[in-house]
Amino acid sequence: MTVDLSRIRSIQDVDAENKRVLLRADLNVPQQDGVVTDATRIERLVPTLELLREKGAKIVLISHFGRPKGERVAEFSLKPVAEALRTILSDAKIDFVQDCVGKVAHDAIGAMQPGEIVLLENLRYHPGEEANDEAFADELATLGDLYVNDAFSAAHRAHASTAAITQRLPSYAGLLMLEEIRALQKALEDPQRPVMAVVGGSKVSTKIAVLDNLAEKADIIVVGGGMANTFLFAEGVDVGKSLCEEDATGLVKKIEGHANQSDCEIVLPTDAVTAKELKSGVKTEQHSISDIPADSMILDVGPDTVADLKRRLAEVKTLLWNGPLGAFEFEPFEEGTFEVAREAARLTKEGKLVSVGGGGDTVAALKNAGVVDDFTYVSTAGGAFLEWLEGKQLPGIAALAAETDET
């Protein structure tokens, strides 16, 4: 997806002094027993919050959380996020409001002073949010003088708080939103070549559009995880008891044909770490891909494949990573993913590689490998990152880039 960044106004250029800024964030963060267990998305919002506070804005923070389906469900309250936010921004006055529209929201916002933050309750408690309802967007618009979208990870949804709202208020992109767009454009639309894409996951059928789009954008696609088994099966390899979509052979051949036309090389494992069952600490073996035991499963790439991928990394300039190479959640099947990730991180730190990763499993794998801070950019977006890789237009970004009247 190509976005004309010149059409998107930056928060850096806005006069926010004493203005109510409706800030759309993605605070859909992991919680357990009413406590936030991973504050990464909150922490990434801090630069935008700090800039708005410096500008003297009254910050009205809005977000979704989970899927309450238009009803008020206690377990999907954003109240625990307010507690986490107070810990992270200990010098800020942060209030939580039990609704995102109506009198209670207006009263809380009316009492705000510049530099203060009000977090409103879950947008999805109202069915109008996911319906991109005009009337609900009208209600939200009465809460602010300006609108800022800093939720790239929600940009693939045309909801009231990401799409319709931009037609009602002067609209800007936050620092995180701009950082995400620039990083992905640099890696996918205007990359340093050669470009290598690592695409993992369990099923080819869930990544068809990604593989098809990358076949035109990348010079090399490394297929990993359960997907690689399906590619190998399509080539006539006996993959034993491995996860495999036997009915996806036609899809594989189509993707391979597209890649061949685009002069894009598809790289598959040449050896594997296998086991008879998937669990931590199980006895493992190493086998050539042509010699997988009938009673075993391919659960990680082998040392020869790792060595080949490290060699290839040294020859490319840009790396896009979405999905692990093996069943990294189970020891010792994380080693292939971790070793290749650490090599990518090393080359990035030496200035030899631009590395961009994204997607839930990818972020978890890079964190566990200890390299999430060493990649050029790691996106916390899930669906939005995938749809960008698919080449789709994201409604939340298109709305910011769209021409409006005096908004």
Image: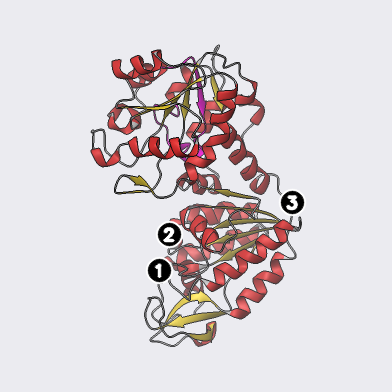
- What residue lies at 76% left-to-right and 55% top-to-bottom? 351
Q: Are marks 3 and 2 in contact (CB under 8 Å)?
A: no
Relative to 302, is 193 above or below? above
The disc placed on residue 245 is 1
In the rendered image, residue 26, in percent from the top left (x then y), is placed at 45, 37
User: Is residue 322 one of those drawn in magenta?
Assistant: no
Give the quarter of the figure containing the N terminus. Answer: top right
Could you say which is closer to the camera, residue 345 or residue 186?
345
Image depth: mark 1 or mark 3 in front: 3
Could you say which is closer to the camera, residue 288 or residue 371?
371
In the rendered image, residue 91, in percent from the top left (x then y), is placed at 51, 31
Q: Amino acid at mark 1?
A: Glu
For marks 1 and 3 on the same chain, the one whose residue lies earlier in the sequence: 3
To which residue does mark 2 refer?
205
Asked whether the viewer can see residue 404, the reply is yes
Give the quarter of the figure containing the C terminus. Answer: top right
User: Label 1 to label 3, Cα distance in Å?
Assistant: 34 Å
